[in-house]
Image (cartoon, helix red, strand yellow):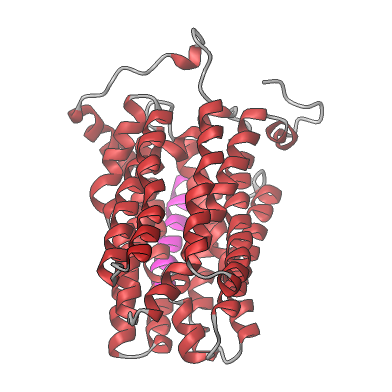
Amino acid sequence: MSQPADGSPLPSVLRNPRFGAFWLGSLLSNIGTWMQSVAEPWLLLNMGGSSFVLGLDAFAMNAPFWILALLGGILADRGDRRRVIFFFQGIQMLCPIVIIALVGLGWLQIWMIVAVSLVVGITDALSMPAFSSLIPSIVTEEELKPALALNSIQFNLSRILGPAIAGLMMLRYGYLWCFGANALSYIPFFLSIHWLAPQAGSAEQVVAEPQKAGSAIEGIKAIVAGQKTGWVLLSIFGTAFFCGPLITFTPVIVKSILHADVKEFGGLLAAFGIGGILGPVLILLLSKHVDAMNLSLTAAVIYGLFLMGVPAVGATWQLGLLLICSGFLLTVANTSANTYLQSQANDQSRGQTASLYMLAMRGGLSLGNLMTGLAISVSSVRLAFVLNGVAALCLQGLLFRRILRKDASDV
């Protein structure tokens, strides 16, 4: 793919029709996902679920990454990534339909919602490494950084549009419409993935030789063995574990502290998405001037400081401001970390690299949600997030200090 005359890869990415179709299909699908993400916790709370139940539901959706993410990476590197996505995301498409059917039959119970979330987590764990490793296969190496940043923008744009639409839909029509919209949102996503299929006889159609289990494990060990790579993965895990639960338990903050309702909750999730859009913009501006790993760790350290501000929240606008800053910092931290990891990977190990990133992020989030839910149940939401913020600040500060020492010793 030729570069534009000014040498900037960004316009080239935006003119890439394959990336554009992938971007739009992912956006529409993520809007549906966020609509259900707004409806589901409120459905659980209205059914009598506690803070622990919310944490358990989030745990069920993320815990499978601990067991299956690495297998998902191997599947992504062994065969056609599009088929992997079609199969497992097709199963996931049925999950909101199951919820609707259970409600219609009058059989829905809390444990059933958690069970469906577990199925979503399993299919995500097995398909997300293939999804994440698709981007490097449809853009050039020079376009990778802006492509990842733009993909992060679409995710956070969906975080704005999804909750906004869900809030209006729930107030007017009810919860089930959000689940239905999520099921329908898979259709344009599948069409975009189908359009990415390579032409017969093209070089892209050649499938890499399947890896043996032993060689795949050795490849994963080699990725983790890199000292800086290991630190980056630990930083991603720490951010997910200590800071990620802020979004999961925002309904608790809204309902128990601010005494607000679902309308305010949807707007607050949108505020987090606004911050998430601003983060990739900063990355695009600084990508040529700042090391991705240092930028990731800096954002992670500051995120820990902001998390300690949860106890000071006394109004919806204050929580909204906190969530804007949190969305900005989380996106900068994770997108920069992913950029660094993908820049170190080759075509034969992109799926495994993506699986390690997903394992650190979603696995850390699963444990963080469970532990934070327990902490809130035995203490308070304010104390739980103060402790999370202190722990995040200490961990990320230590990692940053080690990397600065390593860089100084390499000079």
Residue 115, position as x, y percentages in the image: 26, 60
> Which stretch appears magenta?
392-411
**Is the residue 274 above or below the residue 209 in the image?**
below
Residue 75's image quarter? Answer: top left
Asked if residue 285 shows in the view, the reply is yes
**In the image, residue 90 above or below residue 139:** below
241 horizontally vs 164: left or right: left
What is the chief secondary structure element of the magenta stretch? helix
Image point (54%, 90%), residue name: 258
As drawn, which residue projects farthest toward the top?
A: 201
In the picture, residue 17 is in which quadrant? top right
Identify whether 277 is placed above or below 368.
Answer: above
Given residues 408 and 134, the one toward you in this image is 134
25 or 154: nearer the viewer: 25
Image quarter where the N terminus lies is: top right
Magenta-span inclusion, residue 13: no
How far across and down, in percent of the image, does residue 341 sit? 45, 42
